[in-house]
Structures are given as C-alpha cells and as structure tokens.
Amino acid sequence: MKKQDTNRVTSNTVAQKVGIFFNKNASVLACMMLVAIILSGTAFASSADALWSTISNLIQTWVTRLGGVIMFVGGVMFGLGWKSDDAEQKSRGISTIIAGAIIVAIAALTSQFFA
C-alpha cells in the first residue's frame, strides 16, 4: 500500500510541476502554437496567397454577418419606436440600420482592401 501511495504522490508532484510550467509559460506556448498553425496552413496551401485569400473570405463572411445583425437590431429599434411613437427611438433605429448597411458595404470591399 505504501508503494501505491508513494507513486500517487510522485505522479501528483509531476502533474503539479507540469501545471506550474504551463502556467508560467502560457503566453510563450500560445505564440508557439499560433506560429505552428500558421506554418502548417502555409504548408498545406498551394501558396501564401491561397491562405491569405481564405482569411480574407473569412473576414468578409463574418463582417457581413455582423452588419446584418446590426441592421436587424436597428430595424427592431425602429419598429419599437414606431409603436410607441417615440421620435428619438425611431431616429436611433434608422441610424443603426444605416450603420449596419455601411458595415455590409465595407465587408463587400474586403477583397479591395486585402488584395
């Protein structure tokens, strides 16, 4: 029984040492993992341009979705302002819809920015 307890204490000590190592070096390990991911992406892509275009398409997709959500929120604000006949809420709703439309327009130009 004492051998099992000794092994358990040793394994806990090793686990604690590994945990302490990861806690102390978390930022360095995260940077190393990010570099490894980027390098593996370029290794599997036919060129760096293919990776860049993939990232550009990802940005365009999500920024367009974000603009759509903002336009939706603006529409809800405008509708609630219309219901309660609140001019300030109506104008805020219209402003939010326009802001979402601007974001969608900028997302459509992503290929021009990152070409």
Image (tube, rainbow, N blue to C red):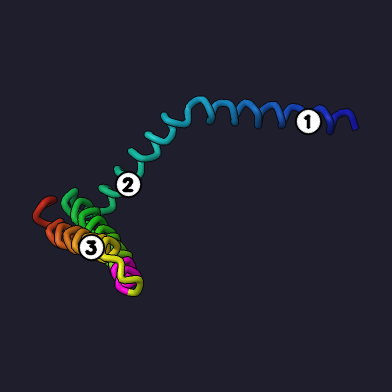
Question: Is residue 68 visible from the viewing direction of this image?
Answer: no
Q: Give the secondary structure at mark 2.
A: helix
Task: Find residue 92 and report its horizontal and vertical position in percent.
Answer: 26, 60
Query: What is the tally of numbered marks visible in this picture?
Result: 3
Task: Find residue 47 and report its horizontal and vertical position in percent.
Answer: 18, 51
The N terminus, quarter of image: top right
Magenta stretch, main secondary structure, is helix
What's the CA distance linking mark 3 and mark 1?
70 Å
State which tag comes first along the sequence, 2 or 3.
2
Let me know if residue 49 is in the magenta part. no
**Amino acid type assigned to the residue bearing label 3 in the image:** Ser
What's the CA distance linking mark 2 and mark 3?
49 Å
**Image height check: is 114 above or below 84?**
above
Label 1 Cα crowd, 10 Å radius (few <14 / some 14-19 / many 20+):
few
Q: 85 or 9: which is nearer to us?
A: 85
**Image height check: is 103 above or below 8?**
below
State which tag comes first along the sequence, 2 or 1.
1
Mark linked to residue 7: 1
**Amino acid type assigned to the residue bearing label 1 in the image:** Asn
Mark linked to residue 40: 2
Circle 2 or circle 3, nearest the eye: 3
State which tag comes first along the sequence, 3 or 1.
1
Q: Which residues are magenta?
A: 75-82
Mark linked to residue 91: 3
**Pointer 3 with pointer 1, Cβ within 8 A:** no
